[in-house]
Amino acid sequence: MKKSPFHFLTYILVIGAYAALQVLQARGELSATMRGMLVPICAYVVMAVSLNLTVGVLGELSLGHAGFMSVGAFLGTSTAIALQDAVPVPGVRLTIALIVAALFAALAGFLIGIPVLRLNGDYLAIVTLAFGEIIKAVFNNLYLGVDSRGVHISLLEDVTNTAKDGRLIIQGPMGIGGIQKISTFTAGFILIMISLIVIFNLVGSRAGRAIMAIRDNHIAAQSVGVNIIKYKMMAFVTSAALAGAAGALFAMNYSTVVANKFDFNTSILILVFVVLGGLGNMLGSIIAAAVLTILPEALRPIAEYRMLLYAVLLILMMLTANHPFVKGFFNRFRQTGQFQLQGDDEEKEAAA
Amino acid sequence: MRRFFGYAPIFYFCVRGEFRVNFIIQFISSLTSGGGGYQLLNHIINGISLGSVYAIIALGYTMVYGIAKMLNFAHGDVIMVGAYVCFYAFGALKLPGALAVFAPLIAICAAVAVCTLLGVTIEKLAYKPLRAAPSLAVLITAIGISYFLQNAALLLWSSSPKVFPSFFVFKSVNEAGEAVTLRSVQIGSVSVSFVTIVTIISCVVIMLWLTWFTGRTKMGKAMRACSEDKAAAQLMGIDVNATISLTFAIGSGLAAIAGALLCSAYPNLVPTTGSMPGIKAFTAAVFGGIGSIPGAFLGGLLLGVLEIFAKAYISVQLSDAVVFAVLIVVLLVKPTGLLGRTVREKV
């Protein structure tokens, strides 16, 4: 397993940011809004790095990443609520919920991946969008109750007949209410670290090289014997599982969660993090996710103009980043080796 | 290329297909004089009407995709802008007497003019500098434009819903001498609203016009050439930038018409009005084969009918899910959409 300095830099910066924020929080220097945003930022960071695995490393555009977040949010939170009495320690319950969320999202990713990964380019993008919308519609009409007789599920109407001793957890369009807020900043930090370890190890492994080979030229990869479906699936399912865990973390930071929260706009929002941060660049995704989550809040003093300004900033950032002069400037840095992307690292290592 | 824009035979198929639908409608209505047949007929007509709107929007998507190879996510919001301009232009117009009949037409023309200008401006400011950039960068920029338009609309026109005026109603006098407003016309056993008729006719006219435009005119040929190979087109003396601008102009103009028609049928106008129809029309364009004009037309119509049928016979809440599920199945069977061109990848 290879490790590049870039990976270490990412780990160190994440740990540093966590430590700094913890110190600030302990000294009471964080505003209430900022404290409330710590967990969502963690969730968005995990969403961004996991989508970066699909878009940046695998090279397939996914427009339905919020769907996996939704699966994780609903099933993870349901698990946590169902286990409320059985597992009294919040930390343990959160861990179980996150694992269950990741498993279900991985399953969803696998099932969706079977049809999706046979397609290419924009067609793949539209099918992920379609699955995202389907997941939203299903959770908007899903009723799930738990009682002593077991789990009851019904669609469209509440015919779960949940007994008095049980609880109707998912209530169709009203989503899940009365969630205990057990997500913590530390849990978010640990989830980010786990995601980074998983992704960096995957990218650095033999499978990771196969995935990147598919991205660079899938015909060439196939002709040297890379099993395209298998490695595409590996990246897609990993990405979905991490997104599921992020969804559960996100949901358990609020008292209610509804399916409409995880719509097309959320998928797009995360895609914006990934593209702005740089494809395949996990540190970039983390920074972009954190900055762009804080930005609308930071722009709050100018109230109604903030989203307009956000849009203008987004367009300007894209225009500047792709301006020939700026690109040439950064490329010069990259060539002198001061500012390397992880892809370049691996090429050099491979050459050495 | 011929399959890309070579829609003429397929277009005739579509027209003939519609005749066939009409024939089937008459057949069914003659068979069933009861409620069931009436309802089925109604659903089909409503579906075709909604599908026509989707088709007009999808045409804009598909033309831009064909020529600029980009998913223009801001297209849905151009629809919304068109609808707002139409709303305010109609409100501001005070035409005397008989001329009042032309007010909707003038309002729509104003919307088309504003949206055409808007489309060209967006292209010049945001997309043109990114011609050489990776497609994802252009996609994100388009999303930025979409956010911008929505929030600008929110500031300009507030988030409170506007009730779109009833275009396409006629004032008449009944037997008793009272003034009545006619909204629909009785055809056989079904009453069809004027909005529906106008929508379907506009869609067919637009389709015919585009067929003529891309097939017969010099500019249309330039468009087809650009979508085939920009560099070669430039060598042949075609102004690629002007052609792309023209495509955006036409697409945005169509979006304005779609906005007016959509809001006449579903008169609830908010800054996010355009996003869902935009996504649906995008789906329709992919459904028919993105880049193909007849594909967009066919895809739009099918999607509209499918949506209304799903709403009527399966479930209102799950209709979107059903529509998208059918899309997925179609793409699995035919990965480039119904009329899409299969591109052989060369090593």
Image (spheres, coloured by chain):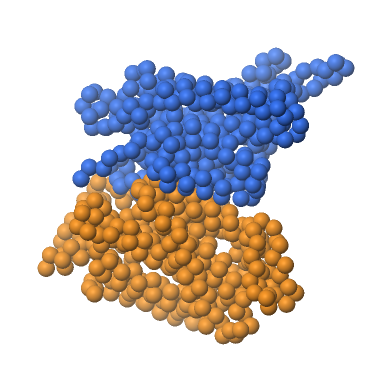
Q: Residue at x 70, y 22 (%)?
A: B187
Q: Position of A237 compared to B279: left or right?
A: left
* Residue A171 percent location from the top left of the image: 66, 63
Q: Residue at x 39, y 29 (%)?
A: B247
Q: Position of B115 compared to B64: left or right?
A: right
Q: Is residue A209 visible?
A: yes
Q: Residue at x 52, y 83 (%)?
A: A92
Report the front residue among A246 and A138: A138
Q: Residue at x 57, y 71 (%)?
A: A77
Q: Residue furthest front?
A: B31
Display colour for chain B: blue
* Residue A51 percent location from the top left of the image: 40, 60
Q: Which chain is orange?
A: A
Q: Position of A21 compared to B36: left or right?
A: left
* Residue B1 percent location from the top left of the image: 31, 29
Q: Is residue A330 visible?
A: no
**Relative vertical location of residue B141 with respect to residue B31 in this rendering, above or below:** below
Q: In which quadrant of the rendered image does the C terminus of chain B lie?
A: top left
